[in-house]
Amino acid sequence: MPENSFDIVSKIDLAEVNNAIQQAMKEVTTRFDLKDSKSKIAMEGNDAIMLHSADEFKLKAVNDVFQQKLVKRGVPLKGLTYTPFETAAGSTVKQKVSIQQGIPIEKAREIVKLVKNSKKKAQASIQGDLVRVSSKDRDTLQEIIAMVKQQDFGIDLQFTNYRTN
């Protein structure tokens, strides 16, 4: 009997994030209320974004513009983690936004526990930053996908690599 499997992952498309940053910066530089606020949005490596502005009110407005652009481009906001505001040079404020790539080990354990407690004939295993679920029956895998979608783990989950071996 062939073994069927799929992966549960949590990935954010960085190209879409970059496009959203470009669009948000274009809007920020042309908006009347943010024109001379020294606001900027920049990527820091592959896992963080830095927001800068003149004060907290303007930083919140810049963040709202940025989030609108992310939603328009199909990037899930659940994958972003915000740090508190920090004061920066020249009496400005900044805020770091971390990008979630991969499933944290605690969340992966919760997913595996959910699959095991479901009494379905399927196995779940943690493989790095993803969870692989396998079963002999495709219908069982479909039921597990539906069950995992109903649960809220606090992170955005995608179901990929569906295959029959």
Image (cartoon, rainbow, N blue to C red):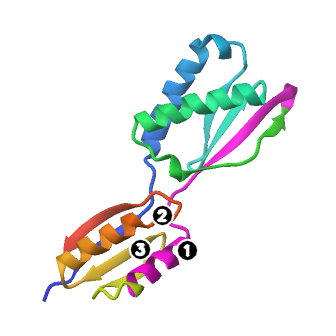
Q: Amino acid at mark 3?
A: Val
Place of residue 155 in the rendered image (x, y in percent of width and height, measured from the top left):
51, 59
Reading the image, the residue beneath label 2 is 152
How busy is the neighbourhood of tag 3: few (under 14 within 10 Å), some, or many (20 plus)?
many
Q: Amino acid at mark 1?
A: Ile
Place of residue 25 in the rendered image (x, y in percent of width and height, measured from the top left):
56, 24
Rendered-image quadrant of the N terminus: bottom left
Outermost residue on the front side: it is: 150
Magenta region: 89-116
Reading the image, the residue beneath label 1 is 105
How far apart marks 2 and 3 lie (CA) works out to: 16 Å
Q: Identify the residue shown where x is 66% and y is 17%.
A: 34
The answer to which of 18 and 131 lies nearer the viewer is 131
Please name which of the two marks, 2 or 3, marks the residue nearer to the observer.
2
The answer to which of 106 and 128 lies nearer the viewer is 106
First in residue order: circle 3 vs circle 1: 1
